[in-house]
Image (cartoon, helix red, strand yellow):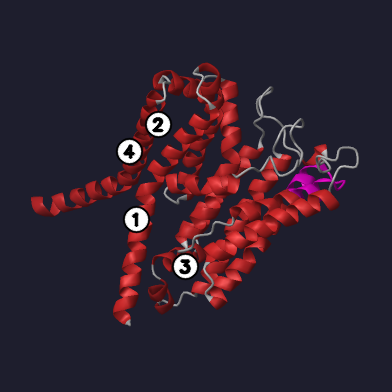
């Protein structure tokens, strides 16, 4: 009797430990990354304690710092989702940068139309998501029908998107009064500021809600279940009646929608002083940064929120590191890179281990 009663307790304990293991891995990687960064700063003559204290104050020291951290995290949640959704489907979708550019262009084009405020915001965000999803479809088609690896196709589409966006920004959407920028979107499409004096706008809630929506799709709908099954084992999924091609298309569509929304967030989700599309600089490398965010969040929609907060804090706090600890920008970037490597290694090693097992299985079949 006692043995039968202890078995469920043992299973529950195992389930709890299984849920805590990813959190432990992430925290360990962060600690290792910070420690290596501290050693590098110490080696080059900087005070790591003072530097990290300044970073923390800059990111969380007051309400404006916390607001700037959330502001920096909002688009990273979405670009992180793009990569995370792909991994769940067994894909390496690194096309968030190009899909984000297309979403930003769509937001600019629709943002200059005279529409009522709420309708204008809704239509602008919808157009951006549609543009991002459409830009991901060629890679999905090539993968599903021709077996073209998505890494190659999405990288190529990123470059096409970059130069196409630059052409359209200069030739069609440029401001006739200021040649260095495109036309500014109307006030009716911009989101209001959450905290006066900060850059944080209410578009941050759009990012969180979309992450929750993706979680619901992946874990509470038949299509999401099929997508995750395809990512785990295509052969078994096909045997169970799941169409892998549809899962690939769904992954690219959802990822493109997230990336397009990230691009729109940088157009309509910035304060009026910055709420304009200028020479692609406001988008920077948010699409590629989303890969690190997804890895930190263990390719989970909820994890992407916390991963984005971490990298948002790094991006915000580095300014204070430079100002108070006199750490140069180059050293700050080195520290960020070490942290990214530390948090990425555990997940990448798992991905490559699965890939090697898959290749071994294919060799045995031959």
Mark 2 nearby-residue class (10 Å; few <14, some 14–19, many ≥20): many
Q: Position of residue 104 (x, y in %)?
A: 71, 49
Mark 4 nearby-residue class (10 Å; few <14, some 14–19, many ≥20): some
Task: Name the residue located 36 percent from the left edge and 28 percent from the top edge.
Answer: 39
The residues tagged by marks 4 and 1 sit, at their Cα atoms, a distance apart of 16 Å
The residues tagged by marks 4 and 2 sit, at their Cα atoms, a distance apart of 14 Å
Q: Position of residue 143 (x, y in %)?
A: 55, 71
Q: Position of residue 236 (x, y in %)?
A: 38, 74
Mark 3 nearby-residue class (10 Å; few <14, some 14–19, many ≥20): many
| Label at residue 138 | none
Mark 3 element type: helix
- Predominant SS along the magenta part: helix
Label located before the other in sequence (1 or 3): 3
Instruction: Point out the stretch of residues depicted in magenta.
Output: 107-124
Disc 2 marks which residue?
Answer: 37
| Label at residue 28 | 4
């Amino acid at each position: 009797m006692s043995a039968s009663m202890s078995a469920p307790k043992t299973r529950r304990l195992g389930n709890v430990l299984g849920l805590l293991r990813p959190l432990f891995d992430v925290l360990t990687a962060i600690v290792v990354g910070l420690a290596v960064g501290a050693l590098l700063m110490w080696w080059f003559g900087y005070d790591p304690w003072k530097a990290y204290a300044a970073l923390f104050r800059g990111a969380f020291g007051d309400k404006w710092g916390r607001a700037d951290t959330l502001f920096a995290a909002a688009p990273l949640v979405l670009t992180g989702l793009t990569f995370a959704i792909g991994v769940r489907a067994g894909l390496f979708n690194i096309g968030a940068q190009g899909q984000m550019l297309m979403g930003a262009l769509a937001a600019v084009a629709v943002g200059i139309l005279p529409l009522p405020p709420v309708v204008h915001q809704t239509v602008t965000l919808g157009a951006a998501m549609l543009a991002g999803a459409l830009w991901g479809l060629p890679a999905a088609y090539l993968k599903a029908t021709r077996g073209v690896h998505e890494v190659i196709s999405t990288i190529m589409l990123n470059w096409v998107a970059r130069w196409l966006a630059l052409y359209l920004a200069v030739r069609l959407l440029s401001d006739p009064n200021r040649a260095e920028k495109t036309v500014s979107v109307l006030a009716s499409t911009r989101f209001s500021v959450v905290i006066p004096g900060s850059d944080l706008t209410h578009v941050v809630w759009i990012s969180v809600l979309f992450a929750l929506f993706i979680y619901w799709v992946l874990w509470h709908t038949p299509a999401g279940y099929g997508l995750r099954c395809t990512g785990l084992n295509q052969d078994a999924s096909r045997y169970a009646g799941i169409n892998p091609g549809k899962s690939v298309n769904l992954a690219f569509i959802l990822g493109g929608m997230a990336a397009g929304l990230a691009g729109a967030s940088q157009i309509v989700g910035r304060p009026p002083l910055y709420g304009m599309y200028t020479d692609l600089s406001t988008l920077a490398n948010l699409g590629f940064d989303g890969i690190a965010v997804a890895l930190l969040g263990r390719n989970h929609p909820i994890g992407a929120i916390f991963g984005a907060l971490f990298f948002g804090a790094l991006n915000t706090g580095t300014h204070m590191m430079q100002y108070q600890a006199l750490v140069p920008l180059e050293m700050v970037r080195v520290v960020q890179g070490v942290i990214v490597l530390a948090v990425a290694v555990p997940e990448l090693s798992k991905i490559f281990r699965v890939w090697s097992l898959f290749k071994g299985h294919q060799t045995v079949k031959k």
